[in-house]
Amino acid sequence: MLKYGEINPLAVFGLRELGHCPPHFTVVDFDIRTTEKIITDWIWSNLTGRFWIGDYYFKNDGGSVSMNKRVGFEIPGEATMFTLVLDQINRFET
């Protein structure tokens, strides 16, 4: 992690944030309450593996289509870490 003075080779070569979610990634779905930039900045600062962030559309119980944010992580432990701190970083800005 760069904040500890370590350079991540994936970040140097632009391979850390992907444009698609590979099937082997562990995904986390959530309602976004802040900007996507705050979420991605936290991931870049605190985690080291590859990730993807995007929209996830689904049918809710009423039959209408809803949207959530979905983040996928290549390292399952990073998905766990992200889930544990999600309530702290995903807040309405007042």
Image (cartoon, grey):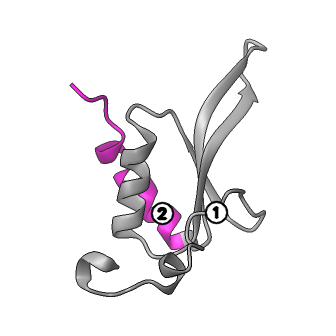
Amino acid marked by disc 2: Thr
Residue farthest along the front direction in this orientation: 13
Q: Rounded to the nearest whole Å, what is the CA distance between mark 2 and mark 1?
A: 19 Å
Please name the residue shown 37% across and 34% down the image.
34
Q: Quadrant of residue 90?
A: top left
Q: Which residue is mark 1?
A: 18
Q: Position of residue 28 (x, y in %)?
A: 57, 51
In the image: residue 5, left or right of residue 79: left
Q: Which residue is mark 2?
A: 80
Q: Which residues are magenta?
A: 77-94
Q: Position of residue 92 (x, y in %)?
A: 31, 29
Q: Judge by depth and name the residue closer to the eye, 87 or 41.
A: 41
Amino acid marked by disc 1: Leu
Q: Quadrant of residue 36?
A: top left
Look at the image and tell me in which quarter the N terminus lies. bottom left
Against 77, residue 87 (above or below) is above
Disc sitting over residue 76 in the figure? none
Q: Main secondary structure of the magenta part?
A: helix
